[in-house]
């Protein structure tokens, strides 16, 4: 089972700033099969990125994903008020179980 | 636009079986994977398992002995059964599709475990 470790646990930033979230895997993720989700309180998660760097339909281009192997990054270039939320990474590589990171909370400084 | 909706009891007694159904609208079950994911209050996400439209299933090893996921293509639904529940199984249960990453989610169904 691949364990995903996200850092930091909490990221305190102001609107307009750049957010950089990390997701590290315990072993290499096959073919960069890594996804990112955003979750707001009381809502289901929303897919942001799949394939490590492909934005899902309707996702603004201020969200970008990068990385390969065991190290992946989600970047939000300029934080908008609606971007303050919890973010999860998830692998869906060679074989299940598919696992999630523990989440990074982006909150308002 | 594919939409998913969970339904089922919100309260289950300890040692009994949790049963939830996910109704899929706006699309067919065919050619896709359908998943169950849960989230205990205030905690992170846990993948429970998936079923392919052919009926092939994959389960999280941590739950495999207690989980069954099934399809009803005539109703465009898939279901989750989790046996012998304990307080640790209390969570919001989500159904999600359509692949091994999850572009579509239901709104979630809160399940409480209590006698």
Image (spheres, rainbow, N blue to C red):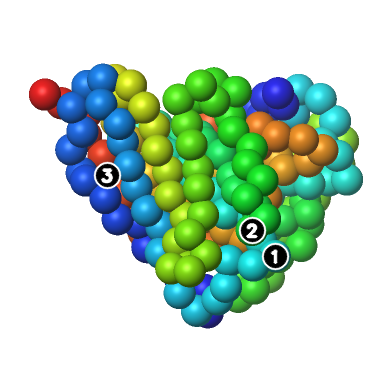
Drawn side of residue B39 relative to residue B103, left or right: left
Label disc, if present, on residue B31 of the rendered structure: 1
- Quick check: marks 1 and 2 in contact, CB under 8 Å? yes
Drawn side of residue B115 relative to residue B6, left or right: left
Quick one: quadrant of the N terminus of chain A? top right
Label disc, if present, on residue B110 of the rendered structure: 3
Quarter of image, res B62: top right
Instruction: Label 3: state its secondary structure.
Output: strand
Viewer-nearest residue: A18 or B2: B2
B11 over B52 or under it: above or below: above
Q: Which residue is drawn at the image coordinates 25% and 26% (left, top)?
A: B16
Is residue A37 among the parts visible in the rendering?
no
Quick one: quadrant of the C terminus of chain A? top left
Chain ID, mark 3: B
Separation of marks 1 and 2 at Cα, in angstroms: 6 Å
Q: Which residue is drawn at the image coordinates 72% and 26% (left, top)?
A: A2
Instruction: Label 2: state its secondary structure.
Output: loop
Separation of marks 1 and 3 at Cα, in angstroms: 29 Å
Q: Can marks 1 and 3 be said to lie on one chain?
A: yes
Circle 2 sits on which residue?
Answer: B53
Label disc, if present, on residue A104 of the rendered structure: none
Task: Report crowding for label 1: few under 14, some 14 to 19, many 20 or more residues within 10 A (C-alpha).
Answer: few
Q: Earlier in the sequence, mark 1 or mark 2?
A: 1
Q: Which residue is drawn at the image coordinates 57% and 73% (left, top)?
A: B28
Q: Which residue is drawn at the image coordinates 48% and 69% (left, top)?
A: B74
Instruction: Label 1: state its secondary structure.
Output: loop
Chain ID, mark 2: B
Q: Earlier in the sequence, mark 2 or mark 3?
A: 2
Front disc: 2 or 3: 2
Viewer-nearest residue: B70 or B24: B70
């Amino acid at each position: 089972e691949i364990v995903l470790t996200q850092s930091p646990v909490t990221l305190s930033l102001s609107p307009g700033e750049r957010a950089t979230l990390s997701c590290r895997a315990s072993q290499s993720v096959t073919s960069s099969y890594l996804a990112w989700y955003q979750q707001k309180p009381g809502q289901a998660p929303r897919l942001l990125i799949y394939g490590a760097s492909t934005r899902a339909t309707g996702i603004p281009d201020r969200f970008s994903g990068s990385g390969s192997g065991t190290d992946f990054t989600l970047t939000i270039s300029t934080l908008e008020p609606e971007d303050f939320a919890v973010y999860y990474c998830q692998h869906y590589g060679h074989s299940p179980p598919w696992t999630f990171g523990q989440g990074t909370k982006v909150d308002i400084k | 636009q594919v939409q998913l909706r969970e339904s089922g009891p919100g309260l289950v007694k300890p040692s009994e079986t949790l049963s939830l159904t996910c109704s899929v609208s706006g699309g067919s079950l065919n050619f896709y994977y359908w998943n169950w994911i849960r989230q205990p209050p205030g905690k992170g996400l846990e993948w429970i398992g998936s079923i392919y439209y052919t009926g092939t299933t994959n389960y999280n090893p941590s739950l495999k002995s207690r989980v069954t996921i099934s399809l009803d293509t005539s109703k465009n639904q898939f279901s989750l059964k989790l046996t012998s529940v304990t307080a640790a199984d209390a969570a919001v249960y989500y159904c999600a599709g359509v692949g091994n990453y999850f572009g579509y989610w239901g709104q979630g169904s809160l399940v409480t475990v209590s006698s």
